[in-house]
C-alpha cells in the first residue's frame, strides 16, 4: 500500500473484519439460508433456549440422566465459542468467560423449576462446569492467543461436523433427548453412554486446546517449554551445588575465598600430581587407621627397600612393621595463596578423616603442642556422629617455636617419654597422619622436621586453570570480563588464588566490566613479592621481554627496564647481598656474561658509590640514603644484562676472603702471643707481617745439606742452632704432616704469607 | 740467646743510640729530673720509636724495666662482652695496644688506665717514682671515642701516671690529645746512618760485606732500619754477599709486582678477574689496603708511558680517597685497576693510530 488510503477506505481496512461480521449477522437475520448455515443452526441452539426435558428421556435413561445433562452442558459449552462470534463479534471470539457463566446460569434458571429434585446432582454438574471453565481459563492464560476469524471458522466447521452426528431435526436412530426450540421446532439431541461421554469429554477437552500458529498443540509446546524450564532449573541447581552458591544475601557476608572454596577433591585447582601424591600418602594410612588394605600397590616392609632408590619427591610406599607409611608426616611447602591449606583439608576429608587444625593463631608452646597432639592422636570425638579418626594439620608451622617442632619430631619418631604414671604402659606410637604446612621449607627451625618428613613442594597453579575458574566465578557474580583478562590477573598476582579473588571482589564493587586495561592499571592485588635472591639477580643479568598488550613479546624499553629494576630492588631490600652477587657474578667466565671494559669501569664506579653510601648509612644511621642505592642496580643491569640465560652462582668469595683474613689475623696474634716479652715489646702486628716475617722465613732456612746431623760442620751446626733459636723466639714451628699420598711433609705450622 | 740481628744489636740506653743523638741527649735531660710530661712519640715504621721509648724508661727506672712479663687482662664492655687484651708490663710500666680490642678500645682505655692510675705508689725507693708509665702503642688506630675518653683521663690522673703514646702518624690523633702531650718526632734514619749501622753490625758478626751491597740495601729500604738489618741478615744466611745480587724482597711485594704485570699485559675482563683474585689474596694475608694500593701504583707507574702518568696518579688518588671513605676496599681497588686498564688501552690505541 504505497498510496495513502482514503479516510473511508482506511476505516474500512481497519474494521473490515467487524463490518463483514456485522453484515453476515444481518444476512442471517434476514435469510434462513445463510452462507454458513451450520453456524446459524448452532446459533439457534446456543441462543437462550428453553430446554424441554421429556419424561420419556427420564424414563429411557434414568441412570444416564445426569451424564446426559453433562453432555448437554458440554455441548452447550462447546458451542459457546461460536456463540459470541455471532452475537458480540470479535470480543467474544477471545472467549469471554463472564458470558459463559452467565449462559450457564441461565440454564440453571431454566432447569431449576423443572427439576428441583435433582438439585444435588445439579450442583455436581455445576462443579464440572466450573472445572471446564477453569480449564478454559487456563488455556486462555497459557495461550493468550489472538484468535482470528479463520480459526473460529475452523472451529465452526468442527462443531458443525459434530452437530451433524449428535443433533437431528427428525427422529434419530440413536438414543436422544427431545428439546423444543423457542420457535416450536424440536431438536433431538443424542444421548451417549456414560463411557462414551467421558471419552468424548476428554477428546473435546483435548481438541479444545489451541493448535495454532506455532504449528503444534499448545499443550505440547507448553509442556516442552515447561520441561525446558525444569531442565534449566535443575542444571542451575546442580552447578550451584558444585561450587555451592549460597543464597544471595548470604553471599554478601562471605568472602569470596570461602564462597568459592572447592568442596570436592575434583574441584581442587592445585597441581594434579601434587594432589594425587598427597592423597596416595593419606591412603597409605588406611592400614593402620581403618584396618583395611590400601588399594595402591605397596611394597611390604623389610624387602630390599634399602636398596631401592627412592627418587626425591616420589612417595615411598613402603609400610613399616606397624603398618604405617615410611613417612609419618607430610611437609607441604609453597608460597601463599596456592591452596595448601585447602588441599590438606580436602584430602584429609576425602580420605575419611576429621581434620584437627593447629595454626599460628593457637598457642604453640611445647606444652600446648603436646596436649593437642596427644588429644588428636589418642582420642576421638564423642560428639561427632560419624566417629571419624583425626588427622592433624599443622598450619604455618614455620612460625612455631623451635622446641615445639623438636617435640613434634620426637613424637613422630616415637621417642616421647610418656608421663610417669603411665610408666607401665607400652610406648605409644603415632597412628594418625600429620600434615605440616609452611611457606619456607628451609627455615632453620624446620630442619629436623624436614629430614623425617615427606616434603611436597607445592607447584604453582597453572595460570590457564586459574583463569578458567576465575571466569566461572565472574560469570556467577555477573562480572563482565574475558579470559585473557583473567589470565593477566592470575599472572600478575603470581597465581595467588586468594589475591585474584580479592581483586575480583574489588572490581565487583565498582560494578563495571573488567578489561585488560583495568588489570594493567590497577595497583590492587600487587603484592610486595618476596622474590628469591636468584630471581633478583636474574632480573639484573637477563634482559626481560615484556608482553605487549596486543599479545606477543617485545624487548622492554629502557625506561621500563630501569623502572623494573628500581621496583624490584626497593621491594627486595637486601641491597648488600644483591650487590655482592652482582659483583661476584659479572665477569665470571662460566656465567656467560659478556661486557666491555668501559662498561665494566662504569659499573665498578657505581660499586664504589654504593659502598660509600652503604658505609654512610651504617656509620651515621642515615637511612634516608637507602633510596639512592637502587640506582646502581639499574646501571649494572644496563652494563651486564644479556638476552640469553645466565648461570649465576651464590657469592662466596667475599665470605671466603673474610674467613681467610680472620684466620690470618689469628695466626699473627698467635705468633705475637708466643713471643717472649723482651722480643714482643719491640714488635707489632703490622711490621711483623710486612717486614719481619717474610724475611725471617728466609733467615731461618739456611742452606743445610740433607745429611745426618753428626756430619755437619761447625759452622753449619751453628747456623742450624741459630735458626732454631730464632724460630723459638718468634714462636714458629715446623709441624709434621702426613700427606694423602703417605709422604711425610714438614709444614711451617703457621702459614705466614 | 742467639737472636735476630735486629734484636741483638738494639741499643738499650739513650747514650748508645746511633742516630738522632741530639734528640737523645735532650730526652736524657728531660728525664733526668725524674719527671716528664706525657709524650707522644711518632715517626715512620722502622725508625726506632719503640727503641727510644724503652731507652727512656730504662733511663727513668733503671734496669728493672727490662724484667718484662706478659699478662692478659680482661675488660668487660657495657654490653657484658668480655674482651681479653694482652699487656707487657714491668714493675714500673705497662704497655698496651688498645686497638687490639677493636671497637671496644674505649673501654680498654677507660678501665685499664683508670685502674692503673688510681693506685698510688706508697713507698718510693731508689728507682721508684711516684707515677707509673702507661705506654699506648698504635694510638693512630684508636677510634675517636677512645681518644676522647683518653683526653680526660690524661689530665685527671696525671699525678699518678704518665702516658707515652706511640704512633706512626699524627693526623689521626685529635688535637686535644696532641696538645696535652710533648710530641717527639723520630724521623727515619738517613741512608748514611743506615749504612753505618749495618757495617757496624757486620763487623760485630765477623761478616765481610761489600760496601756496595750495604749501600744498595740502605737505599732500597726507604729509611726502614729494621728491614735493612733483616735483609742484611737474610743475605748473610743465604751465603750470598755478592754486591750485584738481587735483594731478598718480601713475598707480598713480589706478588703485587706480578699483579701489575698482569694488568699491563692484557686488558680484558678475564684479567680483571685474575687481578681480583690477587687482591683478595693480598688482603686476606693481612697486608693493609693502603700499602697494596701504594705498591701497586708504584709498580704500574714504572710500566706505563710518561704521558698518562699524571692522569693515572690523579685517578689513583681519587680511588684511594674513596677507599678510605668506603668499607669494601677490594671494590675500590678493582675499580681503580679497571680504570687504569681503560686509560692504558686508550693510550695504546692512540699510539697505534699514529702509525
Image: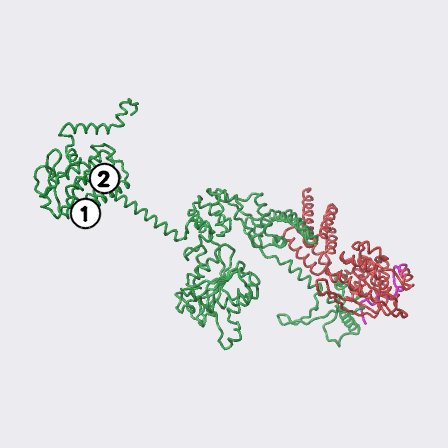
Q: Position of residue B167 (x, y in %)?
A: 80, 58
Q: Quadrant of residue A714?
A: bottom right
For the N terminus of chain A, give its image quadrant: top left
Question: Magenta span covers which residues?
Answer: B1-24
Q: Position of residue B256 (x, y in %)?
A: 71, 56
Residue located beneath label 2 in the image: A101
Q: How is the image coloured?
A: by chain
In the image: residue A273, left or right of residue B141: left
In the rendered image of the structure, the colour used to display chain A is green
Q: Locate residue A44 relative to residue A639 in the image: left or right.
A: left
Q: Position of residue A166 (x, y in %)?
A: 13, 40
Q: Quadrant of residue A563?
A: top right
Subunit that carries the residue with mark 2: A
Could you say which is closer to the camera, residue A120 or residue B308?
A120
Q: Determine if the magenta segment contains residue A282.
A: no
Drawn side of residue A569 relative to residue B128, left or right: left
Q: Residues within 10 Å of mark 1 (few under 14, many from 20)?
A: few
Q: Nearer the viewer, mark 1 or mark 2?
A: 1
Name which quarter of the figure residue B70 lies in: bottom right
Q: Which residue lies under the disc numbered 1?
A: A120
Which chain: red? Answer: B
User: What chain is tagged by disc 1?
Assistant: A
Relative to the observer, which residue lies in front, A707 or A570? Answer: A570
- The earlier-in-sequence mark between 1 and 2 is 2
Q: Is residue A524 above or below residue A705?
A: above
Q: Using the rendered image of the protein, determine whether residue A647 is visible from the camera's viewpoint.
A: no
Amino acid at each position: 500500500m504505497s498510496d495513502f488510503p482514503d479516510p473511508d477506505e482506511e476505516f474500512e481496512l481497519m474494521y473490515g473484519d467487524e463490518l463483514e461480521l456485522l453484515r453476515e449477522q444481518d444476512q442471517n437475520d434476514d435469510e434462513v439460508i445463510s452462507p454458513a448455515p451450520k453456524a446459524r443452526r448452532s446459533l439457534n441452539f446456543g441462543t437462550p433456549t428453553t430446554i424441554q426435558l421429556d419424561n420419556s428421556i427420564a424414563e429411557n435413561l434414568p441412570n444416564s440422566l445426569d451424564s446426559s445433562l453433562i453432555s448437554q452442558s458440554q455441548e452447550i459449552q462447546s458451542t459457546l465459542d461460536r456463540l459470541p462470534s455471532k452475537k458480540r463479534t470479535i470480543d467474544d471470539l477471545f472467549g469471554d468467560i463472564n458470558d459463559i457463566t452467565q449462559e450457564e446460569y441461565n440454564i440453571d434458571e431454566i432447569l431449576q423449576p423443572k427439576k428441583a429434585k435433582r438439585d444435588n446432582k445439579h450442583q455436581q454438574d455445576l462443579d464440572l462446569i466450573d472445572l471446564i471453565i477453569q480449564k478454559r481459563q487456563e488455556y486462555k492464560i497459557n495461550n493468550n492467543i489472538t484468535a482470528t476469524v479463520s480459526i473460529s471458522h475452523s472451529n465452526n466447521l468442527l462443531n458443525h461436523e459434530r452437530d451433524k452426528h449428535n443433533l437431528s431435526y427428525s427422529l434419530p436412530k440413536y438414543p436422544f433427548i427431545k428439546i423444543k426450540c423457542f420457535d416450536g421446532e424440536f431438536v433431538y439431541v443424542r444421548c451417549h453412554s456414560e463411557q462414551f461421554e467421558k471419552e468424548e469429554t476428554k477428546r473435546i477437552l483435548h481438541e479444545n486446546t489451541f493448535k495454532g500458529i506455532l504449528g503444534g498443540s499448545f499443550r505440547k509446546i507448553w509442556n516442552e517449554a515447561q520441561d525446558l524450564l525444569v531442565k534449566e532449573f535443575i542444571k542451575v541447581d546442580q552447578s550451584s551445588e558444585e561450587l555451592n552458591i549460597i543464597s544471595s544475601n548470604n553471599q554478601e557476608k562471605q568472602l569470596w575465598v570461602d564462597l568459592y572454596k572447592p568442596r570436592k577433591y575434583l574441584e581442587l585447582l592445585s597441581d594434579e600430581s601434587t594432589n594425587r601424591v598427597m592423597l596416595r600418602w593419606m591412603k597409605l594410612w588406611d592400614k593402620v587407621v581403618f584396618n583395611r588394605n590400601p588399594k595402591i600397590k605397596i611394597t611390604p616392609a623389610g624387602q630390599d627397600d634399602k636398596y631401592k632408590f627412592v627418587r626425591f619427591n616420589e612417595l615411598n610406599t613402603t609400610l613399616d612393621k606397624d603398618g604405617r607409611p615410611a613417612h609419618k608426616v607430610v611437609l607441604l611447602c609453597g608460597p601463599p595463596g596456592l591452596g595448601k591449606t585447602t588441599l590438606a583439608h580436602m584430602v584429609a576429608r576425602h580420605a575419611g578423616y576429621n581434620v584437627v587444625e593447629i595454626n599460628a593463631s593457637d598457642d604453640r608452646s611445647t606444652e600446648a603442642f603436646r596436649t593437642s597432639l596427644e588429644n588428636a592422636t589418642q582420642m576421638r570425638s564423642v560428639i561427632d556422629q560419624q566417629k571419624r579418626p583425626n588427622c592433624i594439620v599443622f598450619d604455618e608451622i614455620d612460625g612455631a617455636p623451635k622446641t615445639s617442632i623438636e617435640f613434634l619430631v620426637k613424637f613422630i619418631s616415637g621417642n616421647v617419654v610418656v608421663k610417669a604414671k603411665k610408666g607401665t604402659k607400652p610406648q605409644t606410637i603415632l597412628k594418625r597422619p600429620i600434615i605440616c604446612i609452611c611457606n619456607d621449607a628451609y627455615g632453620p627451625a624446620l630442619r629436623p622436621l624436614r629430614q623425617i618428613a615427606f616434603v611436597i613442594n607445592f607447584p604453582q597453579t597453572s595460570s590457564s586453570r586459574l583463569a578458567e575458574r576465575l571466569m566461572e566465578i565472574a560469570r556467577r557474580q555477573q562480572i563482565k570480563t574475558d579470559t585473557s583478562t583473567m589470565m593477566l590477573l592470575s599472572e600478575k598476582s603470581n597465581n595467588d588464588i586468594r589475591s585474584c579473588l580479592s581483586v575480583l571482589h574489588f572490581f565487583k564493587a565498582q560494578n563495571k566490566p573488567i578489561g585488560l586495561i583495568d588489570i594493567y592499571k590497577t595497583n590492587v592485588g600487587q603484592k610486595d613479592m618476596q622474590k628469591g635472591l636468584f630471581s633478583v639477580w636474574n632480573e639484573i643479568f637477563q634482559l626481560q621481554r615484556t608482553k605487549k598488550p596486543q599479545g606477543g613479546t617485545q624487548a622492554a624499553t629502557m625506561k621500563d627496564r630501569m623502572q623494573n629494576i628500581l621496583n624490584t630492588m626497593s621491594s627486595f631490600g637486601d641491597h648488600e647481598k644483591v650487590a655482592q652477587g652482582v659483583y661476584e657474578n659479572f665477569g665470571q667466565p662460566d656465567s656467560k656474561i659478556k661486557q666491555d671494559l668501559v662498561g665494566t669501569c662504569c659499573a665498578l664506579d657505581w660499586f664504589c658509590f654504593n659502598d660509600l653510601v652503604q658505609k654512610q648509612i651504617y656509620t651515621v644511621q642515615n637511612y634516608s640514603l637507602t633510596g639512592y642505592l637502587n640506582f646502581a642496580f639499574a646501571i649494572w643491569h644496563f652494563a651486564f644484562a644479556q638476552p640469553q640465560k645466565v648461570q649465576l652462582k651464590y657469592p662466596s668469595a667475599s665470605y671466603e676472603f673474610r674467613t681467610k683474613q680472620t684466620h690470618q689475623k689469628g695466626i699473627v696474634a698467635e705468633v705475637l702471643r708466643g713471643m717472649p716479652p723482651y722480643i714482643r715489646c719491640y714488635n707489632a702486628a703490622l711490621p711483623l707481617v710486612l717486614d719481619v716475617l717474610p724475611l725471617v722465613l728466609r733467615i731461618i732456612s739456611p742452606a743445610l745439606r740433607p745429611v745426618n746431623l753428626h756430619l755437619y760442620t761447625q759452622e753449619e751446626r751453628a747456623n742450624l742452632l741459630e735458626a732454631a733459636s730464632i724460630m723459638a723466639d718468634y714462636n714458629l714451628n715446623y709441624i709434621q704432616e702426613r700427606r694423602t699420598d703417605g709422604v711425610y711433609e714438614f709444614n711451617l705450622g703457621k702459614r705466614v704469607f | 740467646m742467639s737472636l735476630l740481628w735486629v734484636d741483638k744489636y738494639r741499643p738499650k740506653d739513650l747514650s748508645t743510640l746511633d742516630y738522632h743523638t741530639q734528640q737523645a741527649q735532650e730526652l736524657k735531660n728531660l728525664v733526668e729530673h725524674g719527671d716528664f710530661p706525657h709524650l707522644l712519640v711518632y715517626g715512620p715504621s722502622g725508625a726506632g720509636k719503640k727503641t727510644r721509648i724503652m731507652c727512656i724508661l730504662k733511663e727513668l727506672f733503671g734496669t728493672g724495666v727490662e724484667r718484662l712479663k706478659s699478662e692478659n687482662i680482661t675488660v668487660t664492655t657495657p654490653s657484658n662482652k668480655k674482651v681479653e687484651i694482652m699487656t707487657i708490663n714491668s714493675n714500673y710500666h705497662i704497655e698496651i695496644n688498645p686497638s687490639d680490642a677493636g671497637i671496644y678500645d674505649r673501654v680498654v682505655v677507660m678501665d685499664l688506665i683508670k685502674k692503673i692510675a688510681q693506685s698510688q705508689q706508697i713507698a718510693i725507693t731508689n728507682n721508684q717514682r711516684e707515677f707509673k708509665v702507661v705506654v699506648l702503642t698504635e694510638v693512630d688506630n684508636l677510634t675517636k671515642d677512645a681518644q676522647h675518653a683518653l683526653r680526660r683521663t690524661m689530665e685527671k690522673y696525671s699525678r699518678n701516671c704518665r702516658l707515652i703514646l706511640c704512633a706512626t702518624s699524627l693526623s689521626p690523633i685529635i688535637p686535644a690529645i696532641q696538645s696535652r702531650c710533648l710530641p717527639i718526632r723520630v724521623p727515619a734514619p738517613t741512608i748514611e746512618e743506615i749504612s753505618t749501622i749495618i757495617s757496624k753490625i757486620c763487623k760485630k758478626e765477623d761478616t765481610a760485606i761489600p760496601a756496595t751491597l750495604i749501600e744498595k740495601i740502605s737505599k732500597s729500604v726507604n729509611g726502614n732500619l729494621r728491614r735493612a738489618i733483616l735483609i742484611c741478615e737474610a743475605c748473610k744466611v743465604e751465603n750470598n754477599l755478592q754486591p750485584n745480587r738481587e735483594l731478598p724482597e718480601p713475598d707480598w711485594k713480589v706478588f703485587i709486582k706480578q699483579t701489575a704485570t698482569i694488568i699491563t699485559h692484557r686488558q680484558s675482563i678475564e684479567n680483571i678477574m685474575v687481578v681480583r683474585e690477587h687482591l683478595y689474596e693480598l688482603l686476606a694475608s693481612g697486608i693493609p689496603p693502603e700499602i697494596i694500593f701504594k705498591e701497586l701504583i708504584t709498580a704500574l707507574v714504572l710500566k706505563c708511558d710518561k704521558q698518562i702518568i699524571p692522569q693515572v696518579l690523579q685517578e689513583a688518588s681519587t680511588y684511594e680517597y674513596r677507599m678510605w671513605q668506603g668499607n669494601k676496599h677490594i671494590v675500590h681497588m678493582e675499580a681503580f685497576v679497571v680504570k687504569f686498564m681503560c686509560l692504558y688501552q686508550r693510550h695504546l690505541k692512540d699510539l697505534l693510530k699514529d702509525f
